[in-house]
C-alpha cells in the first residue's frame, strides 16, 4: 500500500527537519504523523538552551545520549518536538503546574 503524502500547515509537502541528529518519531528526518506516535512529534524546532533546560527540569532529558538513535541534543539542533507534551508545556508552563 502506498503511503499518503503528508503536508505541513501551509499545505506544502513535508521537508526534512534534521538528518543529523536524525529526528522524527520514525527516525526518518521528518516530523510526520504516525498512528502509534501518541505524543505527536510534529513540530520541527531549532532548540535553544532554555528549551533544553526546561525539558530537563520536567524530567525529559533531551541532553544526555541514551542510545545509538539518540545522541543527546544541544542548542541549535533541529528536532521534532512533542506537540502533546514538550512544546505545549514549554510555551505555557503555568497551565502545567
Image: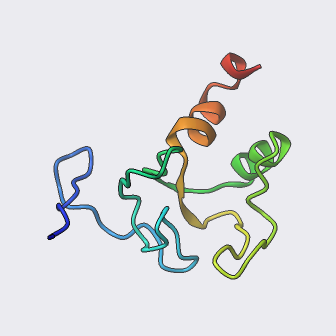
Towards the viewer: 88 or 39:
39
4 on left or right of 47: left
Percent across and percent down for residue 36 are: 45, 52
In which quadrant of the rendered image does the N terminus lie?
bottom left
Towards the viewer: 28 or 53:
28
Residue at left offset 70%, top offset 22%: 96
In which quadrant of the rendered image does the C terminus lie?
top right
93 on left or right of 8: right
Residue at left offset 14%, top offset 70%: 2
Residue at left offset 42%, top offset 66%: 17
Towards the viewer: 39 or 15:
39
Q: Quadrant of residue 69?
A: bottom right
> Can you say whether 65 is above or below 52 in the image?
below
Q: Quadrant of residue 88?
A: top right
Percent across and percent down for residue 70 are: 67, 73
Towards the viewer: 20 or 3:
3
Amino acid at each position: 500500500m502506498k503511503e499518503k503524502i503528508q503536508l505541513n500547515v501551509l499545505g506544502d509537502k513535508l521537508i526534512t527537519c534534521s538528518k543529523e541528529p536524525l529526528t522524527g518519531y520514525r527516525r526518518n528526518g521528518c516530523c510526520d504523523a504516525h498512528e502509534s506516535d501518541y505524543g505527536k512529534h510534529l513540530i520541527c524546532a531549532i532548540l535553544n538552551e532554555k528549551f533544553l533546560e526546561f525539558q530537563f527540569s520536567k524530567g525529559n532529558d533531551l541532553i544526555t545520549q541514551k542510545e545509538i538513535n539518540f545522541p543527546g541534543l544541544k542548542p541549535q539542533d533541529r528536532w521534532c518536538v512533542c506537540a502533546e507534551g514538550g512544546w505545549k508545556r514549554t510555551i505555557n508552563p503555568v497551565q502545567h503546574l
